[in-house]
Each structure stands twice: as C-alpha cells, then as structure tokens.
Image (spheres, grey):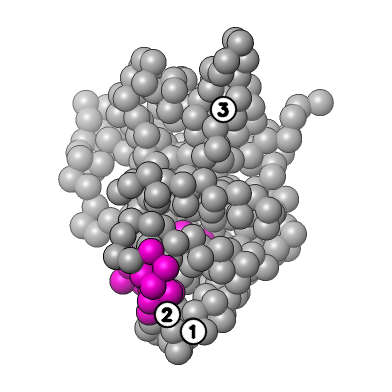
Amino acid sequence: MKMETFVDKLQKSMQEKKSVLCVGLDPQLRFMPPHLIEAAIKKHGETWEAVAEVYRMFNHDIIHAIAPYAAAVKLQAAFYEASYHLWKVLEITIRYAKNNNLIKITDAKRNDGGDTAKIYAQTHIGEIPFFNELTKQAPIRVDAVTINGYIADSCVPYFVDEIKKHGTGAFVVDKTSFIPNSSIEGLMTENDLTVWEEMAYKVAKWGEGTEGQNGYRNLGVVMGATYPEDAEKMREILPKAIKLVPGYGKQGGGADGAVMSFNEDGFGAIVNSSRGIIAAWKEGPFACDPRDYTKAAAQAAQAARDELNEALKRANKYPF
C-alpha cells in the first residue's frame, strides 16, 4: 500500500474541518496589536529579539484561534528572513502548527539548480545529510513548499525526488494572483500557448508518479483566485494536481472565483487568505479592540470557511 502523502493528509484535514481554507501566517509589525509590541519592547528593548517575541506570540495565538476553521497554514518565508531571531520563529511556528493538527506549507518559492536545488528540496520537504552518513529532517521541514519552475529540469526533479521518497508536496509557481498579472506569464510561445500554460504542461510531466492514495498528485501549481477565467483551463491541463489558490480576500479574489480551481469531487485545491484573517482586528467587519485580536481572527476564519463552502455549493462541488 502506498504511504499516506501530503495530498491525502490535506484532503483528510479538509474533511475533518469541513474547510478548504488555508491561513497565511505573514507577520508584519503593522499588523501586530500594540500591547504585544509594548510588552516585547519592555522585555527586550527595540531589538530583533523584541520583533521575534511579538511574532512568536502572535503566531501562537492566531494558530489556536483559526485551527477549528482552517485545514492548513501557509508561512511566507520572506517575513522570517530578516534575522536569525525571526528564522527561529519560523521553526517554532511550524511546530505550533503541527501540534494543532494543521497542514504546513512554506511559501518560499525556492529555485536554483544542481546541488543548491537539491539541498533546498531536502531541507523543506525531505531529509538532509547528517553526521555518520545519516539523514535528518530539518527543523523547518513542512508538508509542502512553493517552488519556482523556470530553471526547469535542473531544479524541479530534485523536489520530485524528495516527494517520492517522503510523501511530501510542492507547488510550482505558475499563474499568480497579482494584479496586473506578470507580463511574462502571459507571453505567447511558439506553440501558441501562454508561458503559464507551457509551465502547467511541464508540471504535468514532472508530476508523473507523485500520486497519493487518493489519486491526486503531490506536485501541483499556484493558481491565483484573481484569474478565475484561467482556472478551468488549468484544471484541464492538470486534472489531478493540487492547486494552491492565493489572492482570495484582501487581494481581490472572490469565493466563486477561488473555487473554480476545485474539481467536481470538491477537492483539488486549497484557498489561502492572509491579511483578511490575521489582521481582521484592525479593519473590516471584525475590527475590534486590539486585545481581542484572536477573537477577530477566529471570526474571520470561520466566515471565510463558510463563504468558500457556500461557493462550493453553488458550483455543485461541496464535498462535505
């Protein structure tokens, strides 16, 4: 029997939570409640240690608040790379998420080729060489990672190797959610396809043999919620590949557009929302006293889950 893989665990988490929601843990000081900042500065002064303390406490509380409503969390690596203090928060947050039965995705968009791609893959979704010819999971190892596919065959196969060995997953950045969209993604090739379509066909080839127990592939793509007109085409190219769907919520993507990436069985994608949930205390329908930020995050996550479920019902894709 095949091992239980990322896509199997993700589907199970979605079914248990009755949720297709992923919450982005993208801490920034502008989203931090003032009382957390004041407490950290009092303890550490205006230092990197203080910033790390704020992010650690915030992520801990947000995870507990959203765990009943979200199937997964996505950690954008950029917000943890400014100092080793913040990188340690990334490790700690991954552990918190694991302890709260959340699927963990690192949005690192790693690329490069050769040995560099290999160590990126081993670090994020595999095992790295250790002492005495042993291998060991890195503290930042997660269930899935985002990668950039433009170095192609000198890069992506290293991630596929780790996927096949360890049952983890990866999402190749393809059709992004930014408005305006990348001018490169939309360029036409000699095959009369856009660059993003060409990339999707590449992912279809690379992903062969990465299927989980549920038949879905553990190598998927990023497919922005802000371009629902392209989601159906993406599903045609990659009918059994998982899609990570950013852009829902604050970036302008609606629930009906987000669920375009799902298949008729109600699976095949996971929808991310970051600022709309973690900064819900600051503005919008759940704005409140900063000390109640966890309550606002919980309410926003529940509302997002329910909105996405209603959109799935309208599309006749509701799986729960």
Spatial distance from mark 2 to mark 3, Cα to Cα?
A: 39 Å
Of 57 and 3, nearer the camera is: 57
Locate residue 210 relative to residue 15 in the image: left or right: left
Q: Amino acid at mark 1?
A: Arg
Give the extent of the magenta segment: 23-44
Q: Residues within 10 Å of mark 3 (few under 14, many from 20)?
A: many
Q: Amino acid at mark 2?
A: His
Q: Residue at x 49, y 60 (%)?
A: 56
Which residue is identified by label 2?
35
Q: Amino acid at mark 3?
A: Gly
Of 196 and 22, nearer the camera is: 22
**SS for tag 3?**
loop
Q: Residues within 10 Å of mark 2 (few under 14, many from 20)?
A: few
Residue 73 lies, with reference to residue 217, above or below; the image says below
Q: How many marks?
A: 3
Q: Residue at x 42, y 46 (%)?
A: 87
Q: Residues within 10 Å of mark 1 (few under 14, many from 20)?
A: few
Q: Earlier in the sequence, mark 2 or mark 3?
A: 2
Residue 131 lies, with reference to residue 70, above or below; the image says above
Residue 12 shows up from this direction: yes
Q: Position of residue 166 (x, y in %)?
A: 64, 27
The reply to whether dot 1 and dot 2 touch (C-beta < 8 Å) is yes
Which residue is identified by label 3?
126
| Residue 31 counted in the magenta span | yes
Using the image, tell me which numbered label, if any, was put on residue 291. Answer: 1
Spatial distance from mark 1 to mark 3, Cα to Cα?
A: 39 Å
